[in-house]
Image (cartoon, helix red, strand yellow):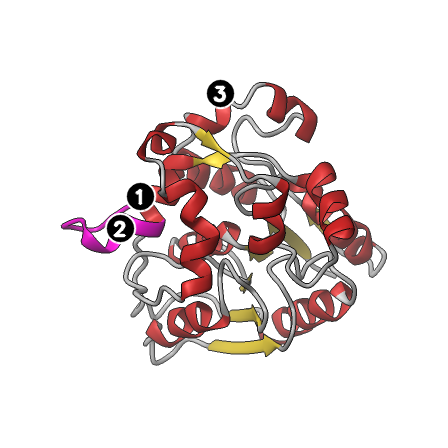
Amino acid sequence: MSTIVLVHGLWMTPRSWEHWVSYYEGKGHTVVAPAYPGFEVEVEALRADPSVIANLTVPETVAHLEKVITALDEKPIIIGHSFGGTLTQLLLDRGHGRAGVVIDSAPPEGIRVNPPSQIKSLFPILSNPAKRHQAAGFTPEQFHYAFTNTLSAEESRAVYDRYAIPAPGSWVWSYGLLANFTPGKQETWVNFHNEDRAPLLFIAGGADHIMPASVNKSNAHHYKGATTVTEYFEFPGRSHWTCAEPGWEQVADKALDWALQHAR
């Protein structure tokens, strides 16, 4: 049995992993789904007072996750979704984890693939420079396009009402738009040639709008370490909400089976 750390993405909290926690625990594993610093309260409280979201930084989030991981009894398998995938890549690059799986991952610095659906998904945030300093959320309609495009409008609204929160607008601007145009190494830089990194699997959804498969494929292909394992797998027809849309168990099984097989 293994310890598994589940890292949530933007516009979400650990509640987004609620099905995976019980699913993996039912298989006998120890599961930890940490919140970003200040996100330990419920979704409803973060909506009511999103100030902690607006002020959050990537370095303090990575440091917080490192503290959680190093306090565990063993090196865990780390699984991250969306920007949680970026954070997972940063954690692996720093020597954490026995294996890593990133699902519909947001890219670290250096990935220059920006498909039209991604631009459209992020446009509500990027179209207003003021949102760079705010907690920036989606409307239910915008969320439906970006996250849950394989669901009906009614199904998407139920997801939105239970899970969605704003995200730090600065993260969307700095890491989704400006990181590749800013001199020097940015806060989401990883060493693609790191020979000591734990094995890493990219899982992409063929119907994902906000982090399309082409972004994940490019991200995976950037890793060049000769002695490390990096693989890519794509589920056709699955959206960004792949970890909870119907059939999510297939994604959970693929992630866990691969990680257990390759963990070191």
Q: In the image, is residue 179 above or below residue 234? A: above
The quarter holding residue 36 reads top right
Question: Looking at the picture, which amino acid does disc 1 mark?
Answer: Ser
Please say if the residues under marks 3 and 2 sit with CB atoms less than 8 Å apart: no
Q: Residue furthest bottom?
A: 226
Q: In the image, is residue 18 above or below residue 129? A: below
Q: Which residue is mark 1?
A: 174
Span shown in magenta? 176-187
Residue 75 visible to an observer of this rendering? no
Question: Looking at the picture, which amino acid does disc 2 mark?
Answer: Ala
Q: Secondary structure at mark 2?
A: helix
Question: What is the spatial separation of the Cα atoms under label 1 and label 2, in whole angstroms?
Answer: 6 Å
Question: What is the spatial separation of the Cα atoms under label 3 and label 1, in whole angstroms?
Answer: 19 Å
Instruction: Say which mark, if any, is on residue 179.
Output: 2
Q: Residues within 10 Å of mark 1 (few under 14, many from 20)?
A: some
Place of residue 257 in the rendered image (x, y in percent of width and height, measured from the top left): 69, 73
Please say if the residues under marks 1 and 2 sit with CB atoms less than 8 Å apart: yes
The quarter holding residue 49 reads top right
- Is 182 situated left or right of 5 in this image? left
Question: What is the spatial separation of the Cα atoms under label 3 and label 2, in whole angstroms?
Answer: 24 Å
Q: Secondary structure at mark 3?
A: helix
Place of residue 183 in the rendered image (x, y in percent of width and height, measured from the top left): 14, 50
Instruction: Say which mark, if any, is on residue 253.
Output: none
Q: Is residue 186 magenta?
A: yes
The residue at the point 78 percent across, 67 percent down is 247
197 and 53: which is toward the camera: 53
Q: Which residue is mark 3?
A: 51
Q: Residues within 10 Å of mark 2 (few under 14, many from 20)?
A: many
